[in-house]
Amino acid sequence: MIVWGGDNDSNGGELLLNTGGRYDPATESWTATNITSAPEARLDHTAVWTGSEIVIWGGFGSSAFYLNTGGRYDPATDSWTATSTASAPEGRNGHTCSLDRQ
């Protein structure tokens, strides 16, 4: 399981996150995801597993109201690659998506 991004307002203020972790149920342990080249902190984004990486896109960020940016996280290499913004949909949050494996 991979957990990434979101909001932590435990101190009474909104704190958007660009951090996460990988959970291994076999060892009951967590490993932090690398944050080098990770997408901007956000909440209400979409995350889709492709079978080899997780794609993060959109959501609400602190530098822009609605984001049309994202990233691809590869757990095998613990690395991020930015998604292209060329012809990307307008920024949005609270959306849904699906994976088309044509």
Image (spheres, helix red, strand yellow):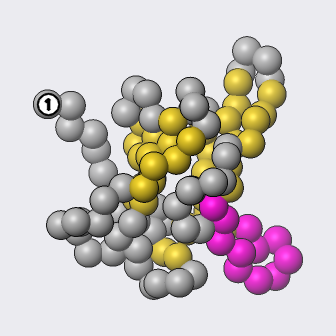
Classify 1 as above or below 44: above
Which residue lies at the image location 37% right of the left edge and 33% below the top edge? 50
Q: Residue at x 76, y 35 (%)?
A: 31
As displayed, is residue 18 above or below residue 60? above
Judged from the image, the secondary structure of the residue bearing numbered disc 1 is: loop
In which quadrant of the rendered view does residue 58 lie? bottom left
Please tell me which residue lies in front, 12 or 67. Answer: 67
Camera-side residue: 12 or 70?
Answer: 70
> Is residue 65 located in the magenta-colored stretch of the structure?
no
Regarding residue 47, the answer to whether it shows in the image is no
Tell me: residue 1, above or below residue 98: above
Point out the image quarter for the N terminus: top right
Left or right of residue 25: residue 41:
left
Instruction: Read off the residue under disc 1.
Output: 102
In percent of width and height, residue 56 lies at 45, 53
Give the left or right position of residue 42, taking residue 15 as reference.
left
- Using a 10 Å C-alpha cutoff, classify the residue at mark 1 as few (fewer than 14 neighbours), some (14 to 19) or many (20 or more): few
Q: Quadrant of residue 95?
A: bottom left
Residue 25 falls in which quadrant of the image?
top right
Q: Quadrant of the C terminus?
A: top left
Asked if 24 appears above or below 74 in the picture, the reply is above
- Counting from the top left corner in percent of width and height, residue 47 is at 45, 49
Residue stretch in magenta: 8-18
Amino acid, disc 1: Gln
